[in-house]
Amino acid sequence: DRSIKIAPSILSADFANFGAECEAIEAQGCDWVHVDVMDGHFVPNLTFGPATCKAIRPHIKTVMDVHLMIAPVDPYIEAFAEAGADVITAHVEAGPHIHRTLQAIRGAGAKAGVALNPGTPVETVGYLLDMVDLVCVMTVNPGFGGQKFIHSQVEKVRSLRAMIGDRPIHIEIDGGVTPETAPLVAAAGADVLVAGSAVFKGGSVADPAPYGENIRAI
Ligand code: DX5
Ligand code: ZN
């Protein structure tokens, strides 16, 4: 279904070739580029920060979708906005003031996203729906690529779709998206699918054709 956007996560790309990897997945037909920022504190893994986002920005023509798995968030919002993030997503679990964080993201000129861990009730975003452009439903516990899709979250996506009504808010799915799980979340109302391992498997910058085949298979 081509109204569904595919956002490859560069967490599964070659870290020594981010620029070329971004260009390769866009040439192979992806819709957005998903950028996973981890701090070794909010999640048990470390990736990179705003300097890397700024460096890869010129290699992305579509949408740079930055997923912050960090706590605290607020001190870094300006830096990620200046690095050129189109969407900045913060976790509802990352601190006591998600409302303030989302205001600050929009204030910095980016689109605002809010992410929910698998154990977090969907009701936590109820009072945020008039200030977000995207809600990200994590379908794995954040921190690593290549984990198994958590099926209980499909019901959460369905509830979220009903809560959103006709507001122009994307529902993004992150974690364990494959050709098998993608139809389940699409049917439940998701419209942006992040996929790391399922997109990058079998390909490389030198041989990017498998990226395209993988994107089309989702
Ligand atoms: C997980 C990240 C995801 C991850 C998805 O913490 O937020 O974006 O890269 O990887 P796959 O698609 O392999 O589950
Ligand atoms: Zn992510």
Image (cartoon, rainbow, N blue to C red):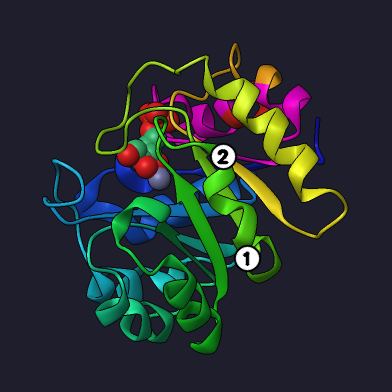
Q: Quadrant location of ligand 1?
A: top left
Q: Which mark is residue 122?
A: 2
For label 2, count other residues whose C-alpha is less than 10 Å away and answer few (under 14), some (14-19) or many (20+).
some
- Magenta span: 185-214
* Amino acid type shown at disc 2: Val
- At 20% from the left and 44% from the top, the residue drawn is 43
Q: Which quarter of the image is occupied by the C terminus?
A: top right
Q: Which quarter of the image is occupied by the N terminus?
A: top right
Magenta span includes 208? yes
Image position of 44 with respect to 96: above or below: above
Q: Tell me where residue 122 sits by quadrant.
A: top right
Q: Which residue is mark 1?
A: 132
Image position of 190 with respect to 109: above or below: above
- At 46% from the left and 52% from the top, the residue drawn is 34
Residue 92 lies left or right of residue 192; in this view the side is: left
Q: Element at badge 2?
A: helix
Q: Position of residue 195 (x, y in %)?
A: 49, 34
Residue 26 lies left or right of residue 22; in this view the side is: right
Magenta span includes 115? no
* Amino acid type shown at disc 1: Val
Image position of 184 with respect to 141: above or below: above
Q: Position of residue 140 (x, y in %)?
A: 38, 27
Q: Position of residue 36 (x, y in %)?
A: 34, 52
Q: Which mark is residue 170?
A: none
- Measure the C-alpha gap from mark 2 to mark 1: 14 Å
Q: Element at badge 1?
A: loop
Residue 53 lies left or right of residue 192; in this view the side is: left
- Would the CB of label 2 be found within 8 Å of ligand 2? no
For label 1, count other residues whose C-alpha is less than 10 Å away and answer few (under 14), some (14-19) or many (20+).
many
Query: Taking the image as drawn, is residue 13 in sight?
Result: no
- 166 or 23, which lies in front? 166
Q: Earlier in the sequence, mark 2 or mark 1?
A: 2
